[in-house]
Amino acid sequence: MGTYPTGVAHRGINRPGGEYLDEWHGWQGQVFYDIPDPTRLAAELSLYRAEGFNAIRFPISWERLQHSLQGPLDPPTTEGGTGYTDQVTGFVQQATAAGWLVVVDLHTYNRYATDAFDTHGNLNPPGVFTPHVFGDGTLGVADLVDVWTRLSTLFLGNSSVVLGLMNEPHDFPCDEDELTGPTDSDRAWCKKNRIPSDIWFACLQQVINAIRGTGSDQLILVPNSRGSDVSHWNTWAPQGGPLDSIAALAITDTIPEKLAFDLHAYHDHVIKDPANPSHVIPNPNTYVQEVTAVTEWARDNHRRLWLTELGVPNSDPVKGPAALTDLFTHLDANKDTWLGWAAWDSGDPAKDFTLTTVDAGGNRSAGLQMPWYTPHLTPNTV
């Protein structure tokens, strides 16, 4: 496994596709998803290697992986073909055998839909499945413990696998935006049953303990209480309870050097005007200012971090690369706290964060933003 000898050791790219469409508000019942077959994956790894990346974050879907809570990981469908779990393990095994570090990312926002699949492994349409949010009485810590016990067992012994416990958990056990015409009683229930930060981190501690109970010694990435974002870390508690910067200190691990906090930070040179949200104003903060507080927290408390999502919009080919340069300079200067980073890649020139583009056959090539990252990469590090 190739690592950078100076600065941040792991410089990665997100490879979305396996999680389609597990979105911010939960499972959407999407048939299509994209995990590349071995031939296409080999070509993608060659592209990433030539640019200088040495890590891949691999988002996956809980519903596709495990069709019923605390049930087995999915088998092949009755119609034949390769099951989702086999595709996930095939991706991970092929990439790690080629020298890559792979972050297996459960990309479901602390949400899960029951009855997303029927007993034969076939997708159910909307109206049949039921969306759930962590803490709602159906989806709970025992389910998260179960799926991660199974996943960590699946990858046991592969030191090139990193375990990302949950992508961007938020608004649990409910989000008023997800309710249809919420009544006052709905809002009251949401507020009364909100899971505060200290309880959430205690739940994550149970997951960590279960993973270590399998014999896993892999790096574990721990999310915060809302969206994995850096902005609220030491300023407010979205779920109530202590600030994440305080509550997170309760997390322990039998292998302390194999634990890090999973954070996201995107940056734009303009932001919505707080006084008039229909207008934008210059962003008063630099990219570095947005991550400085959590960097200092990690150093002061002997903790480590991984920036598993980052990015700037496509719109400014001058300010965008400059912001990335400032960010990476900061991360490199603080490599004792920052273990790695992974840029988000939309794969679509019509969207922001276009590191690659995907043709009609699903093949990837370097996109608009790739030259913005290559000054911070060394080709063929893997």
Image (tube, rainbow, N blue to C red):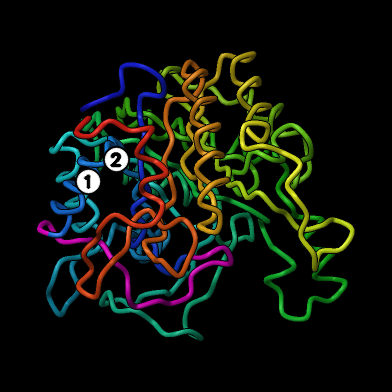
Label 2 SS: strand
**Labelled disc at residue 64:** none
Q: Amino acid at mark 2?
A: Val
Q: Residue at 50% of width from left, 34% of height from top?
A: 325
Q: Residue at 75% of width from left, 33% of height from top?
A: 243
| Mark 1 vs 2, N-terminal side | 1
Q: Amino acid at mark 1?
A: Val
Dot 1 and dot 2 residues touching (CB under 8 Å): yes
The residue closer to the viewer here, 268 or 8, is 268
* Residue 52 forms part of the magenta stretch: no
Q: Residue at 45% of width from left, 70% of height from top?
A: 350
Is residue 226 depicted above or below 368 in this figure? above
Q: Residues within 10 Å of mark 2 (few under 14, many from 20)?
A: many
* Residue 34 forms part of the magenta stretch: yes
**Alpha carbons under labels 1 and 2: distance apart:** 7 Å
Lateral position of residue 271 relative to residue 12, left or right:
right
Q: Which residue is mark 1?
A: 92
Q: Which range of residues does the magenta coloring cover?
A: 23-39
Q: Position of residue 358 (x, y in %)?
A: 29, 66
The residue closer to the viewer here, 235 or 247, is 235
The residue closer to the viewer here, 319 or 79, is 319
Location of the C terminus by quadrant is top left
Lateral position of residue 362 relative to residue 370, left or right:
left
Q: Position of residue 359 (x, y in %)?
A: 25, 70
Q: Position of residue 228 (x, y in %)?
A: 58, 44
**Dominant secondary structure, magenta:** loop
Is residue 342 depicted above or below 21 in this figure? above
Q: Which residue is mark 2?
A: 102
